[in-house]
Image (cartoon, rainbow, N blue to C red):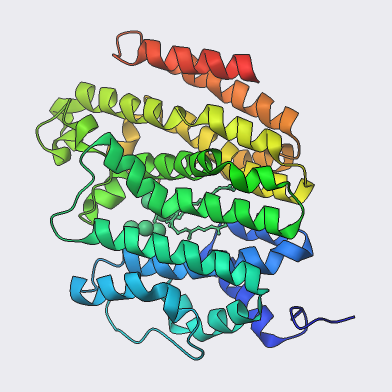
Amino acid sequence: PKTKYDYSNNKTRERLYHHLNMTSRSFAAVIQDLDDELKDAICLFYLVLRGLDTIEDDMTIDLEIKLPYLKTFHEIIYQKGWNFTENGPNEKDRQLLVEFDTVIEGFLELKPAYQTIIADITKRMGNGMAHYATAGINVVTNADYDEYCHYVAGLVGLGLSEMFTASGFESPMVAERKDLSNSMGLFLQKTNITRDFLEDLRDNRRFWPEEIWGKYVDEIKDLTEPENKEKALQCLSHMVVNAMAHIRDVLEYLSMIKNKSCFKFCAIPQVMAIATLNLLHTNYMIYTHENVKIRKGETVWLMKESSNVDSVAAIFRLYARQINNKSNPLDPHFVDIGVICGEIEQIC
Ligand code: PS7
Ligand code: MN
Ligand code: MN
Ligand code: MN
Ligand code: MN
Ligand code: MN
């Protein structure tokens, strides 16, 4: 029998999944493979946060307009009929905001328990984004870096874990382990920030902490100067070690997840992240090209192989070995990377 939460036949649902497919490369497939109880809730969670991130990323919106949007987005999602009307050159996913009434309609049809989780995370993320978007506030220390990544990705992990537990698919322990949930997001976000160095620099956004890059150059943009190539590669391996520190937590988190569709949903982005880190490690291209990405065929293979914890462990072991093999013995992080890679081979 149809419940009021089942909109499988209606136009809203069709539009929502259209937006999901338009805005996400990797998440669209794994979300659509989730069991029915969670599929729409996580699709809406994704679309709400994608809307918020589109505002955060749009460097053409004046701060006076941007900051209030970020801070009140958790209220906007309850306002039936709301659409984004500011003009200005397009962020890639602007259309989602122009038709945001559809997302709001879908959100308001979710079970209240899921609405509450989404609104709470949106509120905390929006306020964190607003803080770091404020003029004069930057990612300076390593603690700032972890805090920014907590706001934009760790919180997603916390919210998803709460949803897994609320659905009954996973035990209460999953929601309780906020530390591990946070690390799931941090590993993805730090990989993204390391890869997107040039793109973000071009947009005048700096997420690499000064506490790291300041050891190698006087100004962050100097990392792209050819005469600083050696320093830039040392800085890159520093960013790689910093991200790899979360892998231990990621593997512990994944070992708690019992539901098959939740497992694949969690594991696929993580194996893509370690494959990406392997591609970035010792790769000077990140300072010269904006589109350093793993190959389509590698992605297909990773998605197919990520169905259980043993094969995911084998994937992590494989990439840890490749990362270790590529390391330069003259690099200051050679030993640190060797230690982490050794640990991964131990755990897995
Ligand atoms: C709700 C599935 C599975 C426990 C839109 C999935 C930006 C890496 O930095 O735009 O702008 O270039 O490429 C996803 C934990 C979040 C973290 C986050 C919501 C995993 C808005 C993904 C995705 C937690 C804030 C890539 C974090 O976006 O980045 C759902 C467990 C959105 C997850 C942002 C980053 C996602 C990201 P950027 P992108
Ligand atoms: Mn962003
Ligand atoms: Mn973004
Ligand atoms: Mn990015
Ligand atoms: Mn991106
Ligand atoms: Mn950008």
Q: Residue at x 51, y 17 (%)?
A: 341
Is there any visible trace of residue 128 in the rendered image? yes
- What x and y, as percent, mark residue 95? 45, 78
Give x and y (percent) for residue 59: 25, 66
Q: Does 37 sit left or right of 220 as displayed?
A: right
Quarter holding the C terminus is top right
* Front-most of residues 266 and 225: 266
Residue at position x 38%, y 10% in the image: 335
Question: Measured from the top left, where is residue 60 in percent x and y?
Answer: 23, 71
Say if 180 sits above or below 76 in the image: above
Q: Quadrant of the N terminus?
A: bottom right
Q: Is residue 55 left or right of residue 325?
A: left
Q: Residue furthest left?
A: 218
Give the x, y percent position of residue 117. 56, 64
154 above or below 325? below
Q: Looking at this view, is 190 or 203 the one in front? A: 190
Q: Quadrant of residue 142?
A: top left
Report which quarter residue 251 is drawn in: top right
The residue drawn where x is 40% and y is 61% is: 124
At horizontal 20% and vertical 41% (from top left) the residue drawn is 140
Q: Look at the picture and state if 55 lies above or below 157.
A: below
Displayed quadrant of residue 318: top right
Query: In front here: 293 or 128?
Result: 128
Q: Is residue 91 visible?
A: no
